[in-house]
Image (cartoon, rainbow, N blue to C red):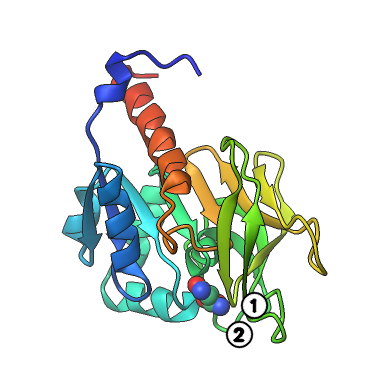
Amino acid sequence: MGRSHYDLRVGMTIGVLALQGDVREHLRTLAALGVEAVAVRRPSELAAVDALVLPGGESTTMAKLARTFALFEPLQQRIAAGLPVLGTCAGMILLADRVQDGTADQETLGGLDITVRRNAFGRQVDSFEGAIEVVGLVQPVHAVFIRAPWVEQVGAGVEVLARVPQGPAVGRVVAVRQGPLMATSFHPEVGGDARVHALFVDLVREHLSERRQGG
Ligand code: GLN
């Protein structure tokens, strides 16, 4: 991928938005990769990170809390300025430019040119897990879905990283990437497999080394 050994030593701090949701699991997974991982609750904490994870949880609650904690606009501004972000489940919804089946007043941070359908898999299959192939990983990921969204439509600049391999939702898009933004419908922070986070860390590293070289 054209990375030099020098680039591999670029240090980074990744924040996890810690308003609600499965914050601890993300912090643990990032720490297991040797990355400095910090909880973000304040604008000053957001300003200090090189990249951010938006965790799973409840997208409407997280958006409201982001307003309460004066983080909503700073988050939008940093995303628009090129902050690398990984959104998982509710985090994917928060990153999406468009939401279907949201609440009437549902707000998103946006940045990712996708339409997500909230709670897309339906009540009967509220939660399920399975092996999913992800672009960039040799072995499939054991993906855990909990009242998950799927990606209904992707814009021209969006790369599809994973689709549901079988069953009633076969072919549905469940992981995407657009520039420094990455999102999964499932929860890579659950189950002790850090490879999706490792993909994100690679993305952050590329992004930081490009910036430091003025590229
Ligand atoms: N259904 C939730 C929402 O709309 C997402 C669920 C999750 O993050 N596990 O925000």
Q: Is residue 103 rendered to the left or right of residue 51?
A: right
Query: Residue 208: where, in percent of width, then height?
Result: 33, 30
Q: Which residue is drawn at 17% across and 57% down?
A: 44
Give coordinates of residue 63: x percent, y percent.
Answer: 42, 74
- Residue drawn at point x = 36 percent, y = 62 percent: 73
Disc 2 residue type? Answer: Ala
Residue 191: name its quadrant. bottom left
Q: In the figure, is residue 105 to the left or right of 125?
A: left
Image height of 176 relative to 71, above or below? above
Mark whose residue sits in front, 1 or 2: 1
Amino acid type assigned to the residue bearing label 1 in the image = Asn
Residue that badge 2 annotates: 104
Query: Quarter-wise, where is residue 143 in the image?
Result: bottom right
Between residue 174 and residue 158, name the one nearer to us: 174
- The reply to whether callout 1 and callout 2 are in contact (CB within 8 Å) is no
Whether residue 111 sits left or right of residue 193 in the image: it is right
Q: Nearer the viewer, residue 190 or 65?
A: 190
184 vs 125: above or below:
above
Q: Is mark 1 within 8 Å of ligand 1?
A: yes
User: Where does the C terminus fall, quadrant-wise?
Assistant: top left
Q: Identify the residue at image location x=19%, y=57%.
A: 45
Q: Which mark is residue 119?
A: 1
